[in-house]
Structures are given as C-alpha cells and as structure tokens.
Image: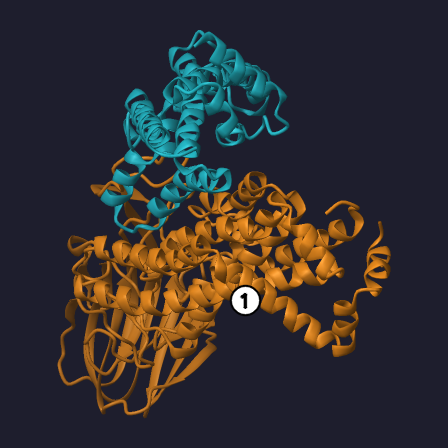
Amino acid sequence: MRESLHAEWTKLRTLASTFWLLLAATGMIRLTLTATPRRLTVLAAKAAVLTSLVLVTGAIAVFASLLAGGLILPGHGIGPSHGYPAISPANGAVLRAAYGSVLYLALIALLSLGAATALREAAAAIGAVLGLLYVLPIIAVFSGNATLSRHLEQIAPMTAGLAIQATTGLSSLPISPWAGLGVLAAWAAGSLVLGGMLLRSRDA
Amino acid sequence: MKPTHWARIHDSDDDLRHHRAAGDRAGITRLLHAEWTKFRTVRGWVIALCAVAVVFVLLSFLSAFESRYAEPSVPTGPGGEPVSDTYMFVHHALAGDGTLTARVASLSGAHTTLSPTSGSAFGASAKGGPSSQLDPGLAPWAKAGIILEPDTNQGTAYAAVMVTGSHGVQMQYNYTHDSQGLAGAVGPSSPRWLRLTRAGDVITGYDSAGGARWTHIGTARLPGLPRTVQIGLFVTSPVYFAAGGGDDGTPSVATASFDQISPQGDLPRHSWTPDAIAASLYPYLPSASTWRQLSANAFTVSGSGDIAPLVGDILSAQWAGASIVNGTIVALLIVIVLATLFATSEYRRGLIRATFAASPRRGRVLAAKAAVAGSLAFAAGAIATTIAEVITRHVLAANGSYLFPQSGPDLARVIIGTGLLLGLAAALAVALGTMLRRGVSAVAAGIVLLVLPGVLGSQSGNWLMRFSPDAAFAIQATLPRSNLVTSAYTPPNGYFPISPWAGLAVLAAYTAVALGAATWLLRRRRDA
C-alpha cells in the first residue's frame, strides 16, 4: 500500500496534466496495473492521494477566500455593522461552511475518480461529472413543478453538496447542510464502488 | 515548417497533383467525405449521436410528463390571442349612442405577500402560497375607469378609458391596443376626469384634469357592436411584483373612488348592476371585488384581476418549451463530448499527421471536421426537437396544462434553431478540441463555455443569457410578451433577455472566433 501511495503521488506530481486529476486515473493504467496487480489497492491509493491533495489545496483556497471575504465584504455593506453575521471562524455557521467547502471539493474529486475509472475515457468522464454537476440544477430551474424542482435539488450532487456553504436562511434550503454533503458523499461512494467493480472485472 | 513548406514537399506527390487538378471543390468534397467516413466508422460515436436525439426526446418527455396542472380554459380575445379578463364591473345597459363621464378622485392598492421562503444560490425553492394579509402597494397596471363592451363574457371586445397605477391615463381596447392620455398619478390634488363616447361602432376616449377642457386620447372601432351594449365603471388590479421580491407575483386589489358620474343616452334600466367578472384562471382576490354607492353619482369600487393579453408567467403551469430546453441541455452535453473527441482523438493516436500529410491545407481539414460534426449535430437536434415538440405538447395537453398557441413559423424557428444551436456548439467543440488537443481540457472548456453560463444565468435571465454562448437558448422562446403587463419575464417562465436570432448569432460569433483561432493555431504550430 505504501509503495502504491508513493507511486500514485509521483505520477500525480510529474504528470503534466496534474490540473485535470482525472487523467491520472485513466492514463498509464496498464503500466500501473502491471506493476501493482492488486487493482483495488491501486484505486484506494489513488483515492487516498487525491483526497489528501485536494484537502490541502482546498483548505488553502477556502482559507484565502474567507480572509478575502472578511476583509472586503464589510467595506461593501455586508458586515456586522449592517446586521450580517461576521465572516469569522468564531461564527459556527461560517466555520461549518469552511470545513464543508473543503470536504465538498474532496468528495467531488472522489466522484470524478470513480467516474474516470468506470468510463476509462477521461474526456467522457469529465463530461459525465460536469454534466451531473451542472445539468441537474438547470433542469430543476426549468421544471415548472416546484416540488419536482426541490426534489431534484435534494438529489443533485452540486446543489445538495453546496448546501454546506449556506450560513443564512437554512430553513429555506432544499436540504440541510450536512444531509446535503451526505448526498454528495453517497454519489462519490457510489461512483467509486462502480469504478472499483469495473476495474476489477475487466481488462485494463 | 510553414504550411507552404508542407505544400512544397507534397508537390511531388502524384495523388496531391491529381487532387489539385481536380480543383478546390473536389478537394473540399473529398475532405468532407473523409471526415464523414472517420465519424461513421467509429461505432461509439454513431451510438453517441443517436443518444443525442434519444436522450433529448426522452428528457423532454419526462419533463412534460412530470408537469401536472389542471387549468381552466383560457378566454381568447377578438384577435384570437389568450387574454386575462377579470375585473369588477358596475354597469348599465346602453341602447344606441351615448356617453359616460366620471371623475376618479383616488386610486389605492394593496397586495398579498408570499409566505416567506427564499431560494438557495442555485435555484428556486418551493414557492410559498399567498398569505391572507394585505400590504399596501398599488400595482403599476392597476386600472380604474370607464369600459364599454357588447356583453359581460370573458374575452369579449371592449374599449375603455382608465387611470392606472403608474402609467397615467390610458385608452385601451381589445386587450392589445393602447394610447396614452394624461401622465402622472391620480390623487386628491390631481383627480382625473374620464369620458367614453359611443357613436355607432366607434368609441372615443377623452380625459381632463379639471372637467372643463377635454383632450381626445384615442378612438377605437369595434366592428359588429350590437345596438345595446354594457357601459360602466370598472376596477381591476393585476399580479403584484414587490420590488426586490424576485419573480413571484401575488394577487392584488385596487380601490377607486368615482364621483361626478353622469351617463347620457338611452339607459333602459334605471339602476346600476354590479358584476365581478372572473373565472378561476387569473390569480385574483375574489373577496376583494366590492362596490359601495355613496350617493346617486358617487361610488367606491374595488377589483382584482386584469384586462390584458395573457403572458406566460401568469399561469402557474410550466412553459411548454421548458421541456425542450431540458432536452437540449442534456443533448448539448453529449454533443460537446462527442465533437471534442472527434477532433482530439486524431491527436491522441497521432493520426493527425497522416491527415495533414494527405491534406496540407490545415484550415480546410478543420473546416471539414467542423462542418461534419456540426451538420450531424444539427440533424440530430432538429429531428429530436420535432419529435419532442409533438410529444411534449401532447403530454402537457393530456395533463390538463394550458398551451399557448404556437404559430407555424415559430415552431419552424424552434426546430431549426435548436438544430443550429447544437450544430454550432459541435463546431465550437471541434475548434476547442483542435486548439487544446487534449480531450479532457477541451471537454471541460466546452462545458464551462456552453453549459455553466446556463447554470448561473438561467434563473434570473441576467447578462450571461445575453452575452454567453447560452444566449442561443433564446431561439426557443415562443411566448407572447406584452408592454401592458408586468410579469417575471425570465427564462424559466419562457422569456429570454435577447431576441431569438440575435441570441443564436451570439453563439455563432463564439463559434466563428473559436474556429478562426483554431485555424490560426493550426497554421502556426510546427508540429502536428
């Protein structure tokens, strides 16, 4: 496992397409699987490396956004002096939104990893994942049926997962913050299980 | 190596010389045929192309299927257009010619509020129902004045002169015609005198600030007006949109004080008849339709509803075209992936070198690729839209939804326009694939360019729906819009912030720029 982890980290570090982590999941798979015949270990290693990387970069990005928001927004009429809750980690909801955003990014990465493993074609995988994320909310907007639209927002990975970022008006959200993140986690888990099953059962 | 260099190398090639002799047209035909063969022979791509059409139709069907609203029949005006015709009417029968004069001393209004709900960043939440509490506020198109009509049926012809909430005095007739009278709001210091005169089937409207000097506002001809008509005072108040309240309107009520009422002409009965003209279609407040006679020639009348063309948002129902939008979005996604892979797979397998060796004019190769991908996406889109239009309208009608009449040219525009939307998107994706060469980055770029703006802009119909490639969805707009009706003219309700062909032109411009950039890059890059 440790060797696998190191191998995955090296691939991620050296591949030109690090930005599109998906590629790492599909590229060079034959070579990797020759070197490490236990395929699920490979997938687990990929998942672990990917998660750690996204957690770290996500935490940095979210911290920077919080800092920027805390500095800029009060000057634009959104701050404690205008009746808005302070954008500071002392505020429980803000803290939850911050942690949650980092977890959201990690779960999206895992969802993508599972999709890429299952589809093998990186371009098709990114189409499927971005489609899943973006298309369901549009369909929710254009379905004139309010109940249907709310249900769609409860099960769509993006709208449900992003509920974790809400700090006000929680009662009007289609789904509560942590339950929403749970929905996204279920999508990620489902995609990884599907990817793992396919990876084990078919040729590289 | 410059392209000219390439050409020089291949001058020695017999095949190429033959090709040149055959002329440019044959060259292009050959290129198109080559690209078509490449597409045709990859089974996955053919399946994906069929999936575009099938998924499109399926999703449109499901969207329509999910929409269940039983709606009463909608009245149609003299021109055959759907109208709202709901108001409080206090009237007299008038035989032959005559005149009704009245002064409007005040006009005030109130509206219900929605029970508090708000959306998340990404879309509508369940709408709250109107509460019973009334908040003060006069709808801009609240109307109070004098109306004349052959009978009190909904959708009947009429001519009216009226004061409005914030559009001054208006003379309106037959729902779609209006002319402007005195500007400014009505109030104790600025009452408005109104007069409506009938001579045969010609109705003339006048207004006056003091009751002495009268100004002609407009004239309406109502052909076939019977000898005995109904003339009287009316008040109505349409759905109210609170400032900053989003696109959810609520029913409202307006109350007007009329005095100095003086009918002239042959009035067979000597008393006024009150009638609340309504069917359950228009969202109005039934309990708000009241009248009180203060003296022989002074009334207070309250009414709720509207006398105007019907626009999409007034009905609770789904806009029929929304199903087509949903189908298009999913088809668009598949088209992006498919067209991108069509362009990039040659790079990945190195086949592009062979392609460019055979056809050194790289710009033409790209053009042929874009043309083949675009035409196929166009065909899939147009066929799917045709089938989806038939199915969704059938399903929606079976579910009891009201469908706005759709003219033949409009239907043709939606079908051809949706095909063009997908075709242009495919050409754009080919250009992106050629520029970025990697399927992953190109698909991501295509989705960010073509789908993401719709996620962010479709709810409100903001600038993204005007300037991003998603402006092209305006080609699917078919609902009537009216200057005489305040409404939420947003994409979910079927209204786009740009005209249909202009919207498609925006996408065409993006595609042209992308193809230009890709051609330039192809010529400049030395490697394949």
Query: x, y percentage for residue A116?
Result: 44, 33
Reading the image, the residue beneath label 1 is B501
Identify whether A96 is placed above or below B491. above
Query: x, y percentage for residue B465?
Result: 52, 51
Looking at this view, is B476 or A57 the one in front? A57
Query: x, y percentage for residue A137?
Result: 38, 41
> Where, by quadrant of the figure, is residue B211 drawn?
bottom left
Whether residue B361 is visible, yes or no, is yes
In the picture, measured across the screen, residue A142 lies left or right of residue B130, that is right
Determine the chain carrying the residue at label 1. Answer: B
Looking at this view, is B489 or B251 the one in front? B489
Whether residue B493 is visible, yes or no, is no
Tell me which chain appears orange: B
Query: x, y percentage for residue A91?
Result: 42, 10
> Where, by quadrant of the figure, is residue B78 drawn?
bottom left
Label 1 secondary element = helix
Residue at figure coordinates x 72%, y 52% from the top left: B517
Dot 1 crowding, Cα within 10 Å, few <14, some 14–19, many 20+: some
Residue at figure coordinates x 45%, y 36% from the top left: A120
In the picture, measured across the screen, residue A53 lies left or right of residue B147, that is right
Identify whether B71 is placed above or below B175. above
Residue at figure coordinates x 28%, y 54% from the top left: B63
- Type of amino acid under label 1: Trp
Identify whether B267 is placed above or below B444. below
Looking at this view, is B436 or B229 the one in front? B436
Tell me which chain appears cyan: A
Q: How is the image coloured?
A: by chain
Looking at this view, is B309 or B371 the one in front? B371
Residue at figure coordinates x 83%, y 61% from the top left: B7
In the picture, measured across the screen, residue B80 lies left or right of residue A135, that is left
Report how many numbered discs are placed on residues in the image. Answer: 1
